[in-house]
Image: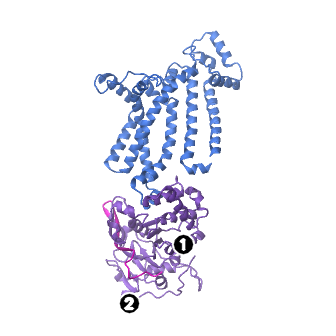
Amino acid sequence: MPTNTLSPPLLDVHDLCVSFTSRGQVVPIVENLSFSIGEQEILGLVGESGSGKSVTAMALMGLIDAPGVHVSGSARFKGQDLLGLSGKQMRALRGREIAMIFQDPMTAFTPVYTIGWQIDEQLRAHHNLSRKQARTRTVELLGEMGVPDPANTANRYPHQLSGGLRQRAMIAMALSCNPSLLIADEPTTALDVTVQAQILDLMRRLRTTYGSSVLLITHDMGVVAETCDSTLVLYSGRAAETGATQDLFAHPQHPYTAALLASIPPMNGPRPDRLPAIPGTPPQPLERPAGCAFAPRCTYTHASCLPAPPPTFCTVGPAHKVACVLPGEGNPLPKRAYTSATPVL
Amino acid sequence: MIMPLLRRLGQTVFVLFGISALVFAVFFATPGADPTARIAGRNAAPQTMEKVRKEYGFDRPLPVQYAIMMKKLFITRDLASYANRGELVVPEIMRAAPVTLSLVSGAAVIWVVLSIGMGVVAAACKGSWIDRTLMMAGLVGISIPVFWLGQVVNLITQNRYHDTWLFSWVPGLGYVPFTQSPCGWFLALVIPWCVLAVMFVGIYSRILRADLVAIMGEDFIRTARAKGLSPARILLRHGLRTALITFISLFGMDFAQLVGGGALLTEVVFGLPGVGRLTYQALNSLDLPLIMATVMYSAVFVVLANALVDAAYLLLDPRVRDAH
């Protein structure tokens, strides 16, 4: 679903930086990240482990409270700056306007309460509902999420449900207050593939049934291709490339995006003997290069990649931006040989 | 729900049988020592020896001896003390039990309330000076030996400052039955309660704080925060509720061993005629029937309490409920 460019985006993140202080050194986790999510848009946030995806989500939710962590920048959500809100104001938004679901549904519920109790709790925290009204809504929500026999399932404890059911219950809980924005942190990583497909299908339908925008955090390019309207690729705490998913998959401009896509087995054409892999490992936050963070692993590295500051976003198409020097130097990456944008699943 | 409890009851009976057989073996079937001579006491007359031998069936096989012993302990209850001739052991324990129960229950209320308060506040203010002060106080409480603390408190309240306004209300050492005077009962016990509770407050508050701090890092706490709940609700309804599972199982065991005679030092220091003091006297005079009876009493209590803890566990933790 295309973003309505006339109205301001639902969430507009500008220059988000997260760093923490360790032994007197400032360790940057996320650097100058900017992105926006429109109404009913699904944005995929892609990156390797440690690239700062989850930290970004936690920072937006105001869930980072470890001592020594510093969050700066702005995140405008419906006219308010999320990063400047007081704890109390943020609590009123959390769960009601912005909800979050987590990677591991096994551990995300409190083990000593029933699923229904926990969904009721969220409803009652934000709305003035009686126990009975809350439970009616809970059962309704569970039913809408495709949980069989929702009235009974509500009375079951988390450990009594399968992973897929638990994640459905988790989504039901997140959607219980009709949030405008749903942040999903690797919602399918802990599930097996068939359940994964069902959950993704459920999430795609959310925007029409609930009108929610979704920030989908994942490391799986296949999930992005299936689900997201636009994509933001993170590498080592910095944005590497962003654009409409179709454009980005058809014509990746950042060597990192291109390498990620190349490492997915092709569905058609000759079968490669070995899948191309990216050599090396992502840099630790403290050892991040002054210039392009991907330079040490990139096959196109040349002199202009190395000095600070890291390359800034340059526009290469409508809403398609890339943090790489190549397009600016007149040497954009070639189009991918095959353009079918649904490689796996 | 019923089946696990029944199964548990069966296990309890089995464990009680095992402990009683073991205690019996230690005291009466150890090779090389004539149980008759041990029961009859030092330098007993041959007539007494003969009487004991017949009474306990020491001329008959071991299982019969065990059965006689259990009969004397639990059914006829006529096991007699030999150091204190003619004194029946079972009624003696029954008289001492309410004293111990009064002492331990009061102390338990104090230590549960205080340690939950201290543990929760310390966990909520993790890393602050409040946290450090509370935990340091807890450590001090653990390090003070209860008999020393009791003696010092006695010295202050009974002796040095007894005539000041602060401690003139403190009655002399000893016990006042609740049925006789509830107020006297309370006054006589309030200081022993506090003294006995000090160490447990220290241990329990430190354990609870550590548990809470660990639990507050769990995924489900992050979920609770993402739901927009208030910090107090997250700490109490999600954190404390989960931490209570460990807390209560620990509490059950400590409570049981104290009721079973573990508050011996406190009872001796404050002159309370409870089960602990009875054990202390029996050990001093090597009164074997009394030792046998107090050990059995204590074992019965610990095993029963353990069964109760497990039952509480079933109620508190749904995961355990399903594992059965």
Image position of A54 with respect to B187: above or below: below
Q: Nearer the viewer, residue B23 or B275?
A: B275
| Residue B303 place in picture, x, y as percent | 58, 35
Residue B26: image quadrant is top right
Amino acid tagged 1: Leu
Tell me, what hue is chain B? blue
Residue A11 forms part of the magenta stretch: yes
Give the residue pinned by disc 2.
Answer: A330
| Residue A167 place in picture, x, y as percent | 54, 64
Are marks 1 and 2 in one subunit?
yes
* Mark 1 crowdedness (10 Å alpha carbons): few <14, some 14-19, many ≥20: some
Task: Give the residues drawn in magenta, as a range.
Answer: A1-25
Secondary structure category for the residue under label 1: helix
* Mark 2 crowdedness (10 Å alpha carbons): few <14, some 14-19, many ≥20: few
Total numbered circles: 2
Tell me, what hue is chain A? purple
Give the residue pinned by disc 1.
Answer: A200
Amino acid tagged 2: Gly
**Mark 1 and mark 2 residues within 8 Å of each other at the beta carbon:** no
Q: Residue furthest bottom?
A: A330
Residue depicted at x 52% and y 65%: A172
Q: Chain of mark 2?
A: A
| Residue A206 place in picture, x, y as percent | 51, 72
